[in-house]
Image (cartoon, coloured by chain):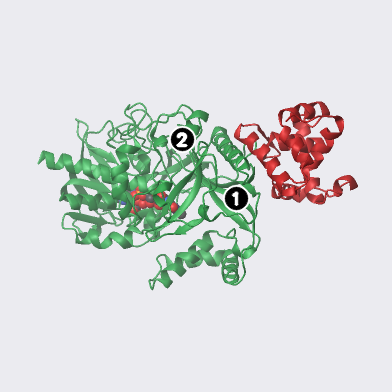
Amino acid sequence: MLADLETLEDNTTLRAPVCIVGAGAAGITMALEFARAGVEAILLEGGGLEFTDESQAIYEGEVTGQGHTDIAFSRLRQFGGTTGHWTGLCAPLAPIDFEKREGVPHSGWPITRADLDPFYERAQPYLQLGPYAYAPADWDGLLTGAPWALDSAVVEPAVYQSSPPTRFAETYLQAITDAPTIRCLYHANLKNLELSDGGAVTRAQVVGYSGKTVFIEAERFVLACGGIENARLLLNFDSQRAGGIGNENDLVGRYFMDHMNCTLSELAPADRQGDIAYYLTHQTDTVPVHIGLKLTEDLMRREGLLDNTVFLDPVWESESHNDDFRDHAWLAFSAIARAFSRGQVPDQFWARTCTIAEAPGAVVTGVYRNIRRRFEPAGTVTTIRFRQDAEQAPNPDSRVTLNGELDPLGMRRATLDWQLTKADLLSLRRTHELIGQAVGAAGIGRVRLGIDIPPLFDAIYTGYHHIGTTRMHDDPRQGVVDADCRVHSVQNLYMAGSSVFTTGGTANPTLTIVALAIRLADHLAGEISGAA
Amino acid sequence: MAKFINRRNVLFGAVGVMSVLATRDFFLLYCRNVSRNTPDFFASLGDESVFGAARAVGRQVKRLHPDFGTETMLARFYGERPLLLEAAEETCLDTRKAMLQSQCGEDFSNGRCLVVDGWVISETEAQLCAAVA
Ligand SMILES: Cc1cc2nc3c(=O)[nH]c(=O)nc-3n(C[C@H](O)[C@H](O)[C@H](O)COP(=O)(O)OP(=O)(O)OC[C@H]3O[C@@H](n4cnc5c(N)ncnc54)[C@H](O)[C@@H]3O)c2cc1C
């Protein structure tokens, strides 16, 4: 069932065994899993079914620290959440990402990759991906080109899959509406959580944009509002707990991580006509697959390095085959073009058109090149650039805090202070150097490092992945939630989304977000049916 | 088979091997910003722009490791890598190139490499470039 909060009586109280706040990738997945298990759930969405400035403005805040990031527009505050923006690259976190790694301070999840494997498998269909197959051998014979003969003790291929990308709003609105056990309210903004003396959430105060208030009473509450907002909400809820709920050890909002999105370092090929097809995108029968290069886990452990997958971006002799013109205007243009080609009306049509109108240069170049490349051969490869979303180490000084400004609902806005360290970049430099040695040994070419000593941060951009602000750890002094994603200091409050990641790894986060959401839904459904 | 090392083949060995740089394209990329005032001696090797770049790399190597490319160092270096002397005398360019790459590859595999001006190069390349700088 789906309803606008504004249609309810003021001060109505609704009840359900579980209440999920936030209808993005995590929240929608959990609601559908509860429906499958026959557990009644209330799903609250602060935004509407479409984009509105009124809801989006609540995400505005301040950015200090690392500058190439954004707090307002990189998130979408509407039904479906930021999956209205995402580009769909997916891979599970690697086994090493869960380990306590000597060279990576504050690393070590209380769960392993093996614990998550069954949930990753179930997450694949939610994101309209192919089989749960991320070992290079799984794709033997199905990909074009041949892998380079690189020393397998040093470098190995990394497999990624592409989601269409799944827009959760379009894909799951009907299922949410039709599920008899789901009650989804939109324009329903979580304003406060009330706690009992015993340390359990008793009810949630939820407000609409006209000031209407609704109360939710549930046995269990889940916050699934995204990596920045999960922390902002907990920090705002400080009327009963000084410093905010779950913040007894001053951890909420700390350890904020993003992926270091950058194209740095390049490979001069020994043979410009050499075969690099294996390291590009493959349109397989089931799902588009991308192959990158990464260091083996043994080598990462030995060298104390952070995780990284290098994707190879060839620069072709013929300019028309190069994609270096891509910017936000081009992405907006391709989203519109894709929707029209599928016979659909594009979402955010006017916002995207304005983005294009503001800086049409890339679109003009892109259209021109795309036409030319139909009749002009690519020629040889002049150089190959290294593109990546590299891991940064968990860092307590990198954080989300509250500032003095209030949003229209009366809640304090967030300040994002994204901090990177020289060690993060030097780890990436060493990773490229080791890849350079491997390609040199194989006679593939020579690598030029794009990171100096001391390193500069100006070529590092956000990966739009907001990670770590309510991190998972067995020890309440080192993490906000336990291995079941429950806030250590609250009996019945759970967190869903990348805010619980202890480390970021290098894989894009949404597949892990969905896997963890399924795992949490299973856990809660088990508890609820056990209690019944 | 140990080759006889004398002053002549130390230097000419370097030049001979260098005339078929293992990764010509690396040097082409490198020389984008290098002036092309190549002396006749090197020009006779054919690809002067590439060779100019090799010399530029060599100058950078020498800045980091002044002893690289010196006769004493080269003599020792060749002693440890007889394949290079054989390569210098090899008349088939393709075979010579393969021999050079094989030596560079072995360096890389054993971690015998260094970063020069951002480029990850093998010790063999560094020594040879320094010799002709
Ligand atoms: C440009 C871009 C490209 C991306 N590409 C990729 C990619 O290729 N691969 C990948 O894995 N990830 C990618 N991502 C990240 C991906 O979009 C997120 O990881 C994912 O959407 C997070 O899901 P979530 O459910 O945790 O949060 P969200 O999807 O952000 O959902 C949070 C929901 O909570 C709601 N909410 C917030 N506050 C409240 C409140 N107070 N009360 C009620 N509801 C509230 C919001 O309206 C929203 O619907 C990309 C992101 C961007 C911006």
Q: Is residue A459 visible?
A: yes
Q: For the residue marked with disc 1, what is the amino acid?
A: Arg
**Is disc 1 placed on a helix, strand or loop?**
strand
Q: Residue furthest left?
A: A532
Q: Residue at x 11, y 39 (%)?
A: A531
Q: Chain of mark 2?
A: A
Chain B tint in image: red
**Mark in the foreground, 1 or 2:** 2
Residue A385: assigned label: 1
Please give the letter of the chain rendered in green.
Answer: A
- Compared with residue A84, is residue A19 higher up or lower down, i.e. above or below? above
Number of marks in the rendered image: 2
Q: Position of residue B101 (x, y in %)?
A: 67, 42
Q: Are marks 1 and 2 on the same chain?
A: yes
Classify the position of the N terminus of chain A by image quarter. bottom left
Residue, far right: B40
Secondary structure under the numbered disc 2 in the rendered image: helix
Position of the C terminus of chain A, as image quadrant, is top left
